[in-house]
Image (spheres, coloured by chain):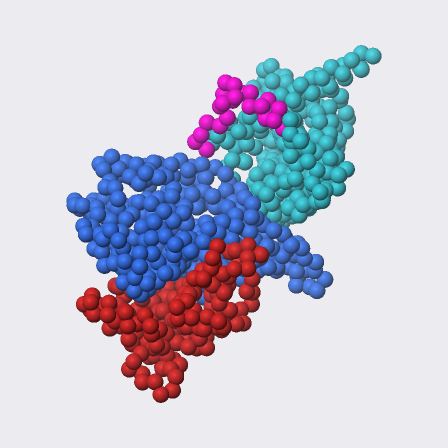
Amino acid sequence: MNELIRLLAYMLCIAAFLGLNLAYLGWVERKGAGHFQRRTGPKEVGPYGLLQPLADGLKLMSKQLVVPANADKLIYMAAPVLIMVPSVTLFVAIPFGENLVPREFNFGLIMMFAFASVAGLSILIGGWGSGNKYSLIAGTRAVSQNIAYEIPMLLTAINIVMISGSLDLNEIIRQQGSYIWNWNVFRLDKSILMPVSFLVFFICSVAETNRTPFDMGECEGELVAGYHTEYGGMGFGLYMMAEYANLVIGASLITILFLGGWQSPIGILPGPHWFLLKMYFLIWVFVWIRWTFPRTTFWGLLNLSWKYLIPFAMVNLLLTALFIKVI
Amino acid sequence: MSSLAQSQLRETFELNIGPQHPATHGVLRIKVVMDGEYIDRAEPILGYIHRMHEKMGENRTWNQFWPNMGRLDYLSAIAYNHCYAGLMERALGIVVPERAEYIRVITAELNRIQSHLLGFGAYIMDLGGFTPLMYAMDEREQILDLLESVTGSRLTYCYFRFGGVYNDIDDDFITGTRAFLKRFRPQIDLYHKLVTGNVILMDRLIGIGPLSPEICRKYGATGPVLRGSGINFDIRKNEPYSVYPELDFDIPVYHECDSMARYMVRMDEMGQSCRIIEQALNKLPEGPVMAEKVPKALKPPKGDYYYAVEAARGMFSMRTVSDGTNNSYRMRLRSPTYSNVSLFEEASRGMLLSDALAFLGSLDPVIPEMDR
Amino acid sequence: MDRAKIKKELEKLAAEGLPAGQPQEEAPVVVQAEGEGEDKAKAKAKKEEDVPRKNGLIETDYAKRGAHLDVQINPDQVVKAAELLDSEGMTIDMVTGVDWIKEGQFEIIYDYSYTAGGPAFRVVVRARVDRNKPDIPTISHIYGGANWHERETWELLGINFVGHPQLEHFLLPEDADFFPLRKDFKP
């Protein structure tokens, strides 16, 4: 019974946390973009434009959902929901603090990757179901992109698993001590290539969350709006929210695997605040990258993955295995 | 081209890019036959903003046609003003006061910088980088304010008159322009730092959309497109008009023939325009800005007249056939992007979709000017 | 580009197009009209109104007209002229059609220029076709750039460019069944 109440409480908290994040990350992104671009960003609705997300939400919700004539109605309607569900589900496994985790799985990492790959599928069926050629191209692009980047991502994650000897996310964090040099990103005693692994993982996360410079699925310069060209109202709203949910998850995963999760960098007061701090810093870096770089081409993107990241990740894995075996 | 694209088993589909599409900067439509991500055939379809300026030229008197000149290329309208003024001054034999010519050059070059700024920003936006557009807009706004103070409009200028310009520039404009130049010059370096050196951008531009000098010649491409293909041709130097021969400036030429070369030509031209404006401001003579004795009723002698200027996108030229009455018998407008984009169909064959759109952006099309 | 050669060849071309027996000296009629006294010019112009210009080459005053050479040839010679100018490295600028309704003729004006650097050189090639049977061979296989210009001229004036690969509506709507630049066009 207690367990049930605990879970319900967590679900409520996650819903609130997610709702706030999804709304206000949009605000952060727009405000950040504004300041990167010598302008102020949203400022009309509320102080500093803080009520802008609410206004946007209201607008999106009040819009009619139009299903295009060519669309496959069921798939068209299901896709935005399907992209949202796994993103939300994943929060159940994220350890925000040592004891602040809804449900501790001993296979948390696998669950993360399993559910994250559903996002690629839902982008494909969204693109297919729209009955629009741009969306279809975007959908196929998104799938090949997701496949290409999941491989190096997994290969790098295996490094971590080998070092930690566990798939449990909380255990992985626990093994990284407090102090900055104990985090996986700097654990040179385990593998000298750890910082580079971190970089690979980071690049793959940008690609997995479909953000510029790797936003091949959206690509507004070529494909109008990519897989969500035909979506309006809350269909589009869900896609937007899923993008930010994926962003939060991507940043959390990097935090957990490489940056010591809730561990403190200076050895005092470990706790969820460090986790959130690191996560939001990473999100800020994502935003920063998005508003600084132009987009790569689809070919360039796949080349980067298959020709550079995957071979590197394999060599890296081999070296780490050797290192662990020898030491 | 991929080996798949060459095989007999390929399956193609049609894709309509535009008339409403972020990459076409307006209402250009490109009917693309795609083979996967490769382009089999890309046919530009024009006319979505066709207003028949040539017929208007026949129906209106010579003076009434002025406002049309601002509505062709809304980004470098002053060059178009310049062409029409030059054409009719050639036909009527009007001598323009020197101060007016200098003012013409100053405003035209400011307008060119403005056009290239937007071209630069919008081009990078095509490639997915949104921030440079806002940086460019910041500077562009200052030019628009300057030009507004002297011409009265922000984009669709109708500033020149037969025999001069209708409004003299004042000290505020001169100091404002000098201040702008001082501020703008370092900005070009900033753009290069922010954008040009970026690895992703170089990957997207270098070697994309090769245009040989031969194809440029066959299609009559001019302006930065031609100069990006290694040909040193600029009407301001090769067929000098106005007071350009008295000013010292260089024509940037790049020999790489790719999108990067065209992009770099535009960036360098902004610096050269700064030089021109600075010299013109220093040399600006005193005197009237309108020729005396411009007849009220304009009746150019029978015959046809031709005049060409270098607009921001290339050679803009007009041919008018006069029958000696107070409106034109035939008014022909040759817009630079019309010729520049006409080579797109041939040059884009076999390109990737994203490369083709990067290539189209490097031609810097302005649709109202193509459709006329 | 060899200016003298272009001039010579075009002159030859124009002479070929003259009907047999017509004295060649008559050709440059218009050239005298320029730069002379106004009255004289007016009188000349009056005289010209009735007589369309004969085939032939004129060296026009660049400062006044904006072109260096101005040649009128027969419609079937425009391809030859284009080939000649192409081999000399000239570029096509534009193709213009003019409706001379009084004379019952269309005039097609080809503007060539030299855009490969060096001082500008502009050549105007004109041809006149019968208004009731406006056929003229296309030059779009020589100059790709002429394709769109010819298509536009066909669309706006109804001049039929024989051999053009795609005489379809371009600037006007697909269902336009009129030629707006013809002088007898009533909107």
Left or right: residue B177 versus residue A27 is left
Q: Is residue A315 magenta?
A: no
Q: Residue furthest top?
A: A2
Q: Please tell me which residue lies in front, C12 or B278.
A: C12
Task: Name the residue at 43% across, 62% down.
Answer: C183
Chain identifier matching the cyan colour in the rendered picture: A
Chain identifier matching the red colour in the rendered picture: C
Q: How many marks?
A: 0
- The span picked out in magenta is A37-60
Q: Please tell me which residue lies in front, B200 or B321.
A: B321
Image position, residue B25 (x, y; %): 50, 46
Task: Name the residue at 72% across, 31% down.
Answer: A81
Image position, residue A77 (x, y; %): 73, 35
> In this rendering, is residue A321 above or below A258?
below
Task: Name the residue at 40% across, 81% down.
Answer: C17
Q: For residue B159, which quarter of the picture? A: top left
Chain identifier matching the blue colour in the rendered picture: B
Left or right: residue C173 versus residue C106 is right
Any part of residue C66 in sight: no
Q: Please tell me which residue lies in front, B39 or A201.
A: B39
Task: Name the residue at 47% across, 57% down.
Answer: C186
Image position, residue C108 (x, y; %): 42, 68
Q: Is residue A39 magenta?
A: yes
Q: For residue C56, which quarter of the picture? A: bottom left
> In this rendering, is residue B266 above or below A168?
below
Left or right: residue B185 versus residue B72 is left
Quadrant of the snapshot with the N terminus of chain B: bottom right
> In this rendering, is residue B20 above or below C83?
above
Any part of residue A37 in sight: yes
